[in-house]
Image (spheres, grey):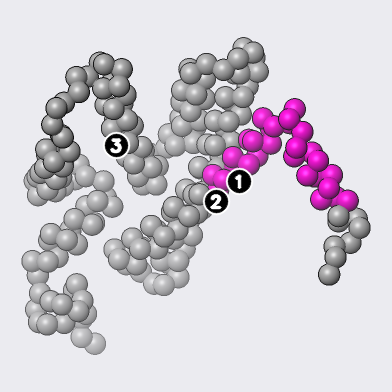
Amino acid sequence: MAAPPQLQALLQAVNKLLRQRRYHAALAVIKGFRNGAVYGVKIRAPHALVMTFLFRSGSLREKLQAILKATYVHSRNLACFVFAYKSLHALQSHVQGETHQMHSFLAAFIGGLLLFGENNNINSQINMYLTSRVLYALCRLGVEKGYIPALKWDPFPLHTAVIWGLALWLFEYHRPTLQPSLQSSMTYLYEDSNVWHDLSDFLIFNKSHPSK
């Protein structure tokens, strides 16, 4: 069934507008907002679903509300950050008439401060995710630029051993310094596995269910 003529005309007008190069910067901001919202849902919803049902207590309704809230906050913050970053980046380029590397840093600096500056669990997870990858990228950039000497051997095994050693040392002796979600995961793996009463909570369940 063909669409009504009015709808076809509207779609043609919209598509014509989207192809206009003079509106590209503004339209890219809008699509960036859209992509940020979609990506936030794709990333947070599965993570929140697994972590909530694995480690969070409460009724099914409370768990679902927690999943929806976490997904909404992550999606909203990421969408707004992309919107702010692309807007500020385009504004700087427009004002100066050309694009500089510093534009990216300044736009993201302001956007990050405004959207991810609040110290909460979701922002903490996002920032920790970025921290590890930024440090890794800076090390690679340092090698490429010659600021850090290139090693003749693969440092990955040593890096892995040190990270895992530090992670378990912190968990065993300085647990409060670790992020709460990491504490929960490590408690499940290394502490809950020390306790059982019979076959049910040895292989089937993590913890025995109280008898009614």
The CA span between labels 1 and 3 is 26 Å
Rendered location of residue 206, percent (x, y): 19, 72
At label 3, the amino acid type is Ser
Q: Pointers 2 and 1 in contact (CB under 8 A)?
A: yes
Query: Residue 1 lies in magenta, yes or no?
Result: no
**Image mark count:** 3
Can you identify the residue that label 2 sits on?
38
Indicate the quadrant where residue 132 lies: top left
Can you identify the residue that label 3 sits on?
132
Secondary structure at badge 1 equals: helix
Residue 98 appears in view:
yes
Horizontal arrangement in the rendering, residue 10 relative to residue 113 (left or right): right
Q: Which residues are magenta?
A: 9-38
Secondary structure at badge 3 equals: helix
Query: Residue 14 lies in magenta, yes or no?
Result: yes
Can you identify the residue that label 1 sits on?
34
Secondary structure at badge 2 equals: helix
